[in-house]
């Protein structure tokens, strides 16, 4: 259960006239594999991410969406109602949508403000998504994490 103090409230955030733009922001699901890839990008390349709760097809204003910033200790949740405003506040030069429409439903894809380029990795084969993410971020650790994940998963079966 989210604590009220952990939620993003735009009225309590200082109004900065010019915040520093970030190169990328990842929008994905909190399903294990997409979240693992996004978290690896954060740890290795300082790329923040927003993780939508799994099985969210409808936008519910109070739905908490996890923000993973540069430091795990600073993670917090924002309400879905403020998703578009929060993305605009972050000033990403590019938004990477990691996952297909089942992973990141259209209603959340539409929250990316106009004018911000969107790069989508929505192949059904997550190895391809991992390789594309690795290529755009210049981060070989992403495919290494993917390979380790699948090896461990197959050993459990």
Image (cartoon, grey):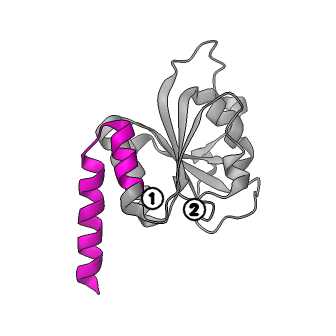
Q: Residue at x 41, y 62 (%)?
A: 126
Q: Position of residue 131 (x, y in %)?
A: 34, 51
**Of the residues under marks 1 and 2, which one precedes in the sequence?**
1
Q: Residue at x 25, y 48 (%)?
A: 141
Q: How many marks?
A: 2
Secondary structure under tag 1 reads helix
Foreground of the two, 147 or 6: 147
Please indicate whether residue 103 sits to the left or right of residue 23 in the image.
Answer: right
Q: Position of residue 139 (x, y in %)?
A: 29, 41
Q: Which residues are magenta?
A: 129-157
Residue behind mark 2: 103
Secondary structure under tag 2 reads loop
Foreground of the two, 1 or 125: 125
Residue behind mark 1: 34
Quadrant (top left/top right/bottom left/bottom right) for the N terminus: bottom right
Foreground of the two, 43 or 148: 148
Q: Is residue 105 above or below residue 153?
A: above
The CA span between labels 1 and 2 is: 9 Å
């Amino acid at each position: 259960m989210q604590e009220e103090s952990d939620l993003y409230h735009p009225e309590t955030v200082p109004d900065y006239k010019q915040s520093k733009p970030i190169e990328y922001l990842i929008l994905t699901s909190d399903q294990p594999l997409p979240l693992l890839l996004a978290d690896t990008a954060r740890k290795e390349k300082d790329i923040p991410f927003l993780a939508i709760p799994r099985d969210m097809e409808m936008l519910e204003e109070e739905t908490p969406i996890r923000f993973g910033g540069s430091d795990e200790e600073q993670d917090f949740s924002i309400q879905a109602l403020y998703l578009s405003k929060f993305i605009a506040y972050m000033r990403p030069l590019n938004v990477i949508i990691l996952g297909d429409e089942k992973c990141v439903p259209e209603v959340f894809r539409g929250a990316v403000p106009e004018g911000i380029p969107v790069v989508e990795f929505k192949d059904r084969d997550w190895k391809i998504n991992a390789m594309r993410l690795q290529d755009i971020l210049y981060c070989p650790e992403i495919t290494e994490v993917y390979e380790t994940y699948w090896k461990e998963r197959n050993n459990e079966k």
